[in-house]
Image (cartoon, rainbow, N blue to C red):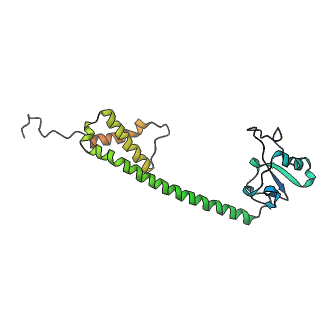
Amino acid sequence: MSETPAADPGRTAETNEPAIYVLIKRGLYWRPEAQGYTGVLAEAGRYAEAQAKPYREEPRLGTKVMLASEAPEFAPACWEETKIAVLKNEIAQLRSRLQEAEKGAEAWKRVALIAAIPLEAMRMAGSYRALAPSTQTCVDEAVVTIRMAVTGHSLPPDGDLDASLAPARAALAAKTAPLPSPRSDDGGQQ
């Protein structure tokens, strides 16, 4: 018994692309170029409409036809040991990719912190006060954005940068407030 093909044999219903099939016999996928069988879809051969058509039209040949995009990762007769080995390999690959991503994230954080140093120094020095208010706001936003990214904090879902930066801006304003004049209010007499 064959699987139901796409509405137009040889084309997928969703994208109208040429359909690619896998062939299944005795519960296992055919390998590429009909060179044996496998229980793992990733190792299965892919066959065009012309190659799959005879098996779809002659179910007595014992081979089922299925769209590769709809086929399960493991064929019905795949050994459990094979499934476990494939899944363990996928887990190992994912762990390796995660470790690489974490290394990259750590390097990115270091670069971001290094980029923030001149901005922090500018804020702490008197030169920050000499900047135009709009430039001060840009520096504040850059420093806060870098800190948020490095610490894993992010903007709220609505993406309201002003609301997210308000507490940081208040803290920065207190930190960079003009220093009191050396003269007191009594006419400069101390």
Residue drawn at 43 percent across, 52 percent down: 109
Q: In this rendering, is residue 136 above or below 64?
A: above
Residue 161 shown left or right of residue 46 in the figure = left
Rendered view: 163 above or below 108: above
Q: Nearer the viewer, residue 30 or 3?
A: 30
Where residue 146 appears, as percent x and y from the top left, is 40, 46
User: Residue 36 sits in which quadrant?
Assistant: bottom right
Residue lying furthest left? 189
Give how far across and how far down residue 107 sits, in percent. Answer: 45, 55
Image quarter of the C terminus? top left
Q: Residue at x 90, y 47 (%)?
A: 57
Position of residue 41 measured from the top left corner of the image (x, y, whole percent): 74, 55
Q: Report the side of 98 relative to 187 (left or right).
A: right
Viewed as shown, does residue 32 lie left or right of 189? right
Residue 1 visible in the displayed image:
no
Q: Tell me if residue 189 can be seen.
A: yes
